[in-house]
Amino acid sequence: METPGMSQQSNSPARVTLPTTEKALMAASATAALSLPPLPYADNALEPVISARTLSFHHGKHHRTYVENTNKLIAGTELADLPLDQIVTATAGKAERANIFNNAAQAWNHSFYWRCLKSKGGGEPPTALKQKMEEAFGSVDACKNELANNAIAQFGSGWAWLVLEGSKLKVVKTANADTPLTHGLKPLLTIDVWEHAYYLDYQNKRVDHVHAVIDKLMNWEFAAENLARFAANGL
Ligand code: MN
């Protein structure tokens, strides 16, 4: 168990100083294999809403498996050297590539999802995001309700998303591994509603999980950073 408040980033391999030749070898192999990004917080940082046990399975088993499967499936193909988002867009909608798409999109979705959560999250979004929410939904609460309703309404496994469609905020839901990246939408925030995201802590009570995540863990600052990044590139 991690010490509360201790950041896993301090153990990140990226901070290890290596001899030059070893660095070069790692860089060469890095282009051939995707890696599992570390969680941006300790396993227990999201308790009591999401337990350390759920996070360790969700990140250490589910997310890891998507990354490892993607690596196996792209090895030796023209996809092998592409960044993950390009593997996702290159395989979307292609029946013969469905297995690669499912694993790659799940790898991308999860890397994004971890950053959408934080300890002591929720509350009021930063001003620029708040104004966009009011423009599109009438109020911050109406936007949060739309996000909750989509997360709850997704039948079976999937995701609820706050996205930009053009310059306007919108809430959408996607099934299984599907991701806004392949629909011309720019993702700002997501909630994972696969059962593996909540079943150990909430069993079948997805509604309770979704409300707790929105009220206590949402990293609106991350969504606002995404909004600013897209705005800087021109909406
Ligand atoms: Mn998941």
Image (cartoon, rainbow, N blue to C red):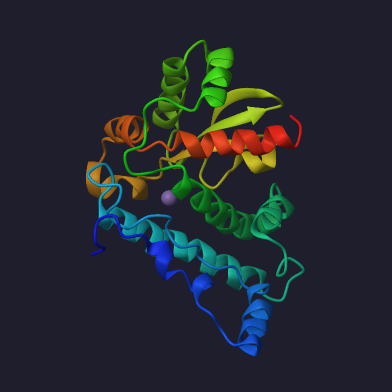
Asked whether 49 or 101 is in front, the reply is 49
**Number of callouts in the render?**
0
Residue at 72 percent across and 69 percent down: it is: 81
Residue at the limit of the structure toward the top, as seen here: 138
Q: Is residue 78 visible?
A: yes
Residue at 40 percent across and 45 percent down: it is: 194
Q: Quadrant of residue 203?
A: top left
Q: Quadrant of residue 69?
A: bottom right
Asked whether, in this view, residue 141 is left or right of residue 206, the answer is right
Residue at 47 percent across and 65 percent down: it is: 65
Asked whether, in this view, residue 19 is left or right of residue 58, the answer is right
Residue 217 x %, y %:
35, 38
Residue 205 x %, y %:
26, 35
Q: Quadrant of residue 219?
A: top left
The quarter of the rendered structure image containing the N terminus is bottom left
The answer to whether residue 124 is above or below residue 229 is above
Residue at 30 percent across and 36 percent down: it is: 209
Q: Is residue 61 visible?
A: no
Residue 28 x %, y %:
69, 79
The quarter of the rendered structure image containing the C terminus is top right
Residue 113 x %, y %:
47, 46
